[in-house]
Amino acid sequence: MLVKTKDKLCKELNKIRVKGETVGLVPTMGALHQGHLSLVKRAVADNKVVVVSIFVNPTQFNDKSDLSRYPRNLNADLKLLEDSGCSIVFAPDTNEIYPEPDIRTFDFGDLDKVMEGKHRKGHFNGVAQIVSILFELIKPDRAYFGLKDFQQLVIIKKLVKMLNLQTEIVPCPIIREPDGLAMSSRNELLSDEERKNAPFIYEILQEANNQTGKKSVKELINWVINKINSNTYLTVDYFEIVNDKNLQPVTSWEDDCKKVACIAVFCGKIRLIDNYFLN
Ligand code: PAF
């Protein structure tokens, strides 16, 4: 069922709640692909009712041209969700979500001072605005987020704690194309040549994982940046190896934490992100 207003959404959810049924939420910005469908599949397995939200949230875009070129195709999204087992697609317009400008600011400490937060000012504040609005409206028992947006996942877990919410955050694995490129709505914006070269990012992340014993953290970081920049279609925006809990840069392989290699790369004008848990 397609729902466009908060009123209708709350009415439908009230009917579900009186029956004591569990609700899972998959928040998306549309342009759905198999990565999103894997979240929906997991949500359907865990919950009686699944809501998929489709909303290109303007407050999380620091770059106006990125917002205007972001792919939108509600009909194709609905078609893809037809047999997915999701019960409600919530696809509001901007005025429905932000009848007044959202002036809230969230303090995530150091979590949003690095990587995406540093390179896309205000991005995570916007993500927190929309996610908190959706959580407040839907009150999901569980919400599903892909590990591709690793920093987002860590920040949303923090948000849930800060707001004392009951929603369980369920991390889901990165889904890749057969050539290794992490699935992303932005992939459809790549030209043929860019698309052919984009899998190089994952190739190098895998190679980096094999080099942890042979190079220092700093040497490995430089090696990855130089390798990727040597491909004329790719330019590294940042590459960091961070502690999976506090997202602070790891300085030595001896640091007592799981280490995640996180990368953002411009492929032409399109900015792609990926990450790899090093072992
Ligand atoms: O990951 C995304 O697609 C978005 O950041 C989210 C969580 C749907 C919020 O707009």
Image: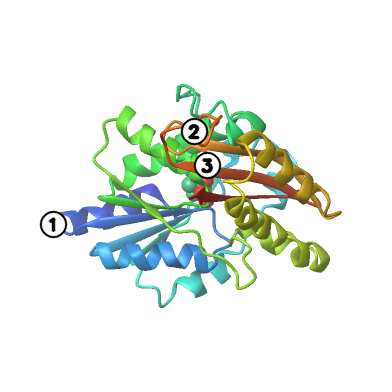
Instruction: Identify residue type, mark 3.
Output: Asn
Q: Is residue 1 visible?
A: no
Instruction: Identify residue type, mark 1.
Output: Gly
Residue linked to disc 1: 20
**Residue in view at x 60 percent, y 36 percent:** 116
| Disc on res. 95 | 3
Q: Nearer the viewer, residue 85 or 41?
A: 41
Name the secondary structure under disc 2: loop
Residue 151 left/right relative to 85 = right
Q: Determine the image quadrant of residue 115.
A: top right
Residue 143 left/right relative to 173 = left
User: Do tag 2 and tag 3 residues touch (Cβ < 8 Å)?
Assistant: no
**Residue in view at x 72 percent, y 60 percent:** 200
Residue 82 at x, y = what percent? Answer: 43, 75
Q: Residues within 10 Å of mark 2 (few under 14, many from 20)?
A: many
Q: Residues within 10 Å of mark 3 (few under 14, many from 20)?
A: few
Instruction: Identify residue type, mark 2.
Output: Leu
Cα gap from disc 3 to disc 1, whole angstroms: 31 Å
**Residue in view at x 46 percent, y 35 percent:** 128
Where 19 sits versus 264, above or below? below
Q: Is residue 207 visible?
A: yes
Q: Choose mark 2 or mark 1, whichever is in front.
A: 2
Residue 239 at x, y = what percent? Answer: 66, 40
Residue linked to disc 2: 247
